[in-house]
Amino acid sequence: MKTLRDWGLSTLTDIQDEDKMINFSGYSILYSATENVHLLIFDNEVHLPPETFYFIPPKSPVQYLGETKSALLIWFKVDLFVDRLEFLQHIKRGIFFRDPLGMAVENNFMSYTSIMKYYYLPTQEGLMNIIFAKNLLVNFLEFILIRTLMVHDPKLYEYRKDSYEKEIANEFVYLLQKETTFSFTMEHYASQLNITKRTLDNAVQTMYGCTAKRFITAKALEKAKKLLRGTETPIKTISQELGFSEESNFSNFFRKHTNSSPSEFRDHAISQIPNLRSARLSSN
């Protein structure tokens, strides 16, 4: 039996077990590609025509009926979007994975040929650095989510949001973008917005599904990773740009949230080129 790791993109024939079941506790999206795909979910038969994306919630048992050749499965855990908190609310609370029986969406976004050329083939057989492959998968997922929202909810972020909390959250994000460094005390931002820390937390929780502190942490990590991956900026300078008074404080912060030091992360991003398929799949 094959167990899926945290994220990946493969054909169904590569990942289904002997019972044609998918063994994954996170989120997944089936792409029927050029085929009619038949599956069983919670004892309900679902028939998908070609060029369909099918959003499958966590812990929904899926069995594939018949044979498939071109159909693909994209799978991921919500941690894949830790640096993109704007998408967390849609994944965890939005329309995509709300129905335990899944949600089918017609693919009129991108052709099968383009999906294979630009997303599937580059991530196979270790042809791409695993970090680049991961970013490519995230970009593909974001594209699917955004285009689906444009069809099913043109207002995107407007649905189910209280206007007052939305305004606070928007002002908070603007404040983060305007300031050159981060402050990790929520009182700093609450004071500038003339609200309490609890009000700020409630607004961010409503909009992004996390606390204000976690939002700031994710944004700081996102900036740190970009600088470590894409520049030769000294780590001490990066720590100062993020708002840390000491390089050691930044290193401790980074290790706490990534399980690696800034220098280890930079070295890994530059030099490690593992076999992607073996990194994404394991056989028991």
Image (cartoon, rainbow, N blue to C red):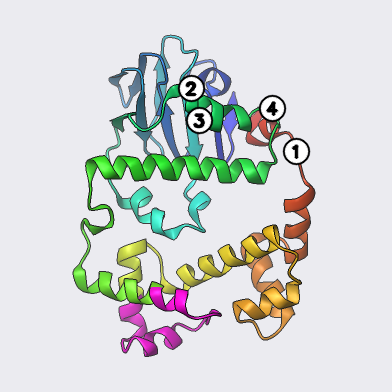
Residue at 69% across, 58% down:
229
Q: Which mark is residue 274?
A: 1
Front-most of residues 26 and 68: 68
Residue with the most extreme top position: 66
Indicate the amino acid at tag 3: Asn
- Residue 169 vs residue 266: left or right? left
Mark with earlier residue (4, 2): 2
Q: Which residues are magenta?
A: 174-200
Which of discs 1 and 3 lies nearer the camera? The answer is 1
Residue 58 covered by magenta stretch: no
**Residue 259 in which image quadrant:** bottom right
As rendered, which of 281 and 159 lies closer to the eye?
Answer: 159
Q: Nearer the viewer, residue 190 or 19?
A: 190
Report helix, strand or loop for mark 1. Answer: loop
Do the CB atoms of the residues marked 4 and 1 lie less than 8 Å apart? no
**In the image, is residue 183 part of the stretch drawn in magenta?**
yes
* Residue designated by label 4: 125
Disc number for residue 23? 3
Up/down of 126 relative to 205, above or below: above
Q: Is residue 203 left or right of residue 136?
A: left
- Look at label 1 and name its amino acid: Pro
Task: Check residue 113 in the rendering and tell me which mark sits there, or answer none.
Answer: 2
Residue 11 in the image: state x and y as whole percent: 53, 22
Q: Residue 41 at what x, y percent from top left?
A: 33, 25
Mark-to-mark CA distance, 4 and 3:
22 Å
Q: Earlier in the sequence, mark 2 or mark 3?
A: 3
The three-letter amino acid code for the residue at tag 2 is Thr
